[in-house]
Image (cartoon, rainbow, N blue to C red):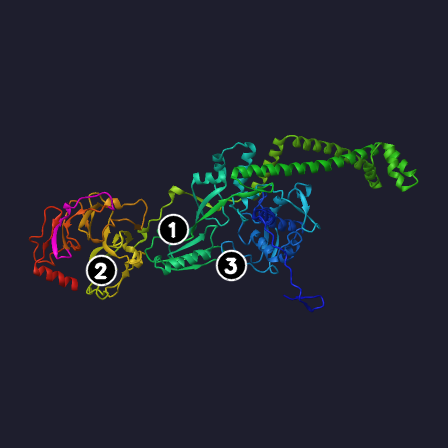
Amino acid sequence: MAKKTKKGSFSDEPIVSAPIQNQIITDTIEKNYMPYVMSVIISRAIPEIDGFKPAHRKLLYTMYKMGLLTGNRTKSANVVGQTMKLNPHGDMAIYETMVRLTRGNESLLHPFVDSKGSFGKQYSSDMKFAASRYTEVKLDSFCNELFRGIDKNAVDMVDNYDSTMKEPVLLPTTYPNVLVTPNKGIAVGMASDICSFNLAEVCDGTIAVLKNPNITTDKILDIIKAPDFPGGGAIIYDREAMKQIYETGSGSVRIRSRYNYDKTENCIDIIQIPYSTTIEAILKRISELVKEGKLKEITDFRDEIDLNGFKLTLDLRRGVDPDKLMTKLFKMTPLEDSFKCNFNILIDSSPRQLGVVDIIKEWIRFRIGCVRRELEFDLAKKKDKLHLLLGLGKILLDIDKAIKIIRHTEKDEDVVPNLMQGFSIDKIQADYICEIKLRNLNKEYIINRINEIEGLQNEIAKIEEILGDELKIKALIASQLTDIKKKYSQPRRSQLIQSNEIVAYNEEDHIENYNVRLYLTREGYFKKITLQSLRGNDEQKLKEGDSVVLTEDTDNLSDLIFVTDKCQLYRARASDFDCVKASSMGDYIPVKLKMDENEKPVFMRVQKGYPEGENFVFLFENGKGVRVPVINYETKGNRRKLINAYSSASPICGVFYEKEKEPFEIMLVNSEDKAIIVKTSLIPIKNTRTSAGVTVMTLKRGAALRECIKDFDPYYDTAKGYRKLKIPASGQLLADKDIMSQQLKIDT
C-alpha cells in the first residue's frame, strides 16, 4: 500500500504497523478505569460530611467571595461565569446546580439561594427554569451558617484546577447540613440518596449525641422522628422500618399525597405529593387508568398550579366516596410513592454507608476540628495583639524617654532598633509603636490600651481553657445549635401517619356489583351480559359450528375457575371481563387469560371459597376417574394460574363439580356407543391432584370415552339398563333411538 511523503507524492514503501501487545485486563482496569471511578466517587457524585458535592460547594463559595451574602442580587449568568474559575464545566451544568439550591425551585427545606425569576419547580418535570440572563440571585441569610469561620482557617484551602485561586475542601457548617439538605448522586458502582430531616429536630438530636455519645437509636427516634420532605406529604410511619434506616442508612420511606375534599364543587384538591414523583407522572397514570375504564369515579382531572402553590384537581361523579377513591388512587398511581434511602457519604475521602447516629457522630468530629481551628486562629490573633500592646505598655510608662530616643535618632531606619534597645522590645512591637499617631499619646488613649491588655489576657485564658477541654468545645457547639434552632427552625412539613391507621386498598370496595349471566362456548368464547341487557334479546351470536356449553347466573364480584385441556387451572373474576351484548362474540378465553398455545377451557365454575367436603370430578378418555377435594386447589397467594391441576396420563373427557353430600349421576359414553350411568359417590377420592384415578368404565383395546354427560335426560329416552351400582363396569350398547339422538347432538 502506498503512503504519502512530506512533499505530497506517494511512495511504494509498505506501511509498518506497531505490533499488537497483549495486556492483562485487570492491569488495564486498574491503570485506566479505577482512577476514573475514584474521580467520580470523590470529586463529583457523593456528598461529603458538610452535606455538599463539589459542584454545590464551588458555586456557594464563589457567591460568598462575590459578596452576595450581604449585597444585592446579581444576574445568574454573572455567578455562573465566576463559578467557572473553580468548576471547569459548561455553564448549563453550573446553572442547573444553582437552580436546585434556589428558593424558587422548592427542592430544599432551607434554600441557600435567594432567587428572583422563574426557576421551575421540583415537583414538575415540564416546568422549566428561565435562562440565566433573566434571573437574579444572592445568598440567603441562612448561608451565614455555612461560612461561619471560613475566614478563620476553620477548614483547609486548596488550589483550584489552574492554581490561580484558593477554594475550601469543605464548608464549616455549624449544623449537620448533610441531614437537613436532601441529596442524590449516582457514581460508578455506588449511589447516594439522602432524605432531608427537620432542622429543629436535627439540632436537638445532635445536642443529645453531644451530651451522650452512647445514645440509643430509640432515643434518637424520639427526637428526630422521621424525614421531613420539602414537598410535605404524609409519611406512613413504621417505627421498626425507620429504626432500620437510622441504624444502617438503608431502607424505604413510604409517602402519600395530602388532599382536601371540596363538597360544594364535588372535587378532590391534592395539595401535596411525594417528593420522589412529579405531577406529570401522576397525570399520565391517571389518564391511562381512565382510558382503561379503571377510574370511572372521575369525570375530569387537571393541573391547577398557580401562584398560591401546588394543586391537582379531580372532579368526581355524584355519590363517589372521596376517601375510598383516594385509597384506590394511592394503590394505583404515584400519589403514594417510596423514597429509597441510601446514606452513602464521603468520610475522609472514603465512601461509607452510615446510619443517622453515625452521621451525627462524624459531623461532630468534623465540627470539633473546625471549632478548634477557629479558636486557635482567634487565640493567635489575640496573642499577637497582646504582644503589641505589652510593647506599647512599656513605652507608655515613659513616653518622654521614647520621644527623646526618636528625636535624637539621626536616621529613619535607626528609630526601630533604638526603641528596641531602649525599652527591651522586639521589632514587631517597635514597628507598631512607630505607627502610632502623636495625637493618640493622651491620657485616655493610654488608659484604654492598658485596660485592653487586661481584657485580652482574660479572653486568651478563656480560649486556652476551652481548647484544653473537649467537653467545653462540645458545649460551644451545642450553644451554636441552640441559636440556629431558635433563629431558623420551621414546623414539620411532612405529617406522620401510623401504618396501623392506614386503610388497606380492597379492590372489591371499588368494583360496581350487579347481576350478570355468564356464557361459555365449546370453542372457548366467554360472555358476561347484564340481565337488563338480556330482556327481550337472549339470542346469542356464536361462531359458526360453536355452541353454548355452560350458562350461569351470578354477580359481578364472583370468582371464576377455568379448567383447561392442558391440565391447568386458571382463576379470574367476573369483573375482569367487560359486559357485552348478546350480539357480540365475547372474549376469547385463551387470549384473555393468556393460556398456552392450543390450550382451551373445558370447564368453568363460579367458585366461592374452597369448602371441605366438595370435590372436582375428573373423567379421562382411558375410562378412569377420580374425585379431588376442592381444598387442594387453595393457594396462599392470589395465583392466577395453577399447573398440574389433574393427571396428564390420559386426555380429559369431562370435568364436574360435586357439592358436599350431593352426589349426582354421570352418563359415560364410549367410542363403541356403549354407555353406563354411575353416581359420583362411587368414584374414589384422592388427595393428590395428579392422581390417575381408578377405572370407572372398562374399555376394549382401542376404545375410549367419547362423552361424559351430567344432565343426560334431554338426549336419551331412557336410562334403564345403563345404571351401575359398582365400578368398574362394562358399558351397555345404546338403543337405536339413543344412538340417533346422540348422532343428532354431535351433528348440531
Helix, strand or loop at mark 2: loop
Q: Residues within 10 Å of mark 3 (few under 14, many from 20)?
A: few
What is the x, y in percent for residue 88?
Answer: 64, 54
Q: How far apart in space, not on screen, are marks 3 and 1 (Cα)?
A: 26 Å
Helix, strand or loop under label 1: helix
* Residue 566 sits inside the magenta stretch: no
Instruction: Name the N-terminal-most of marks 2 and 3.
Output: 3
Stretch in magenta: 670-690
Pair 3/1: label in front: 1
Question: Quick one: label 1, few (<14), some, or many (20+) residues within 10 Å?
Answer: some
State the residue in front, 630 or 722: 722
Q: Is residue 683 magenta?
A: yes
Q: Which residue is mark 1?
A: 331
- Residue marked by disc 3: 127
C-alpha span from label 1 to label 2: 38 Å
Q: Which mark is residue 522?
A: 2
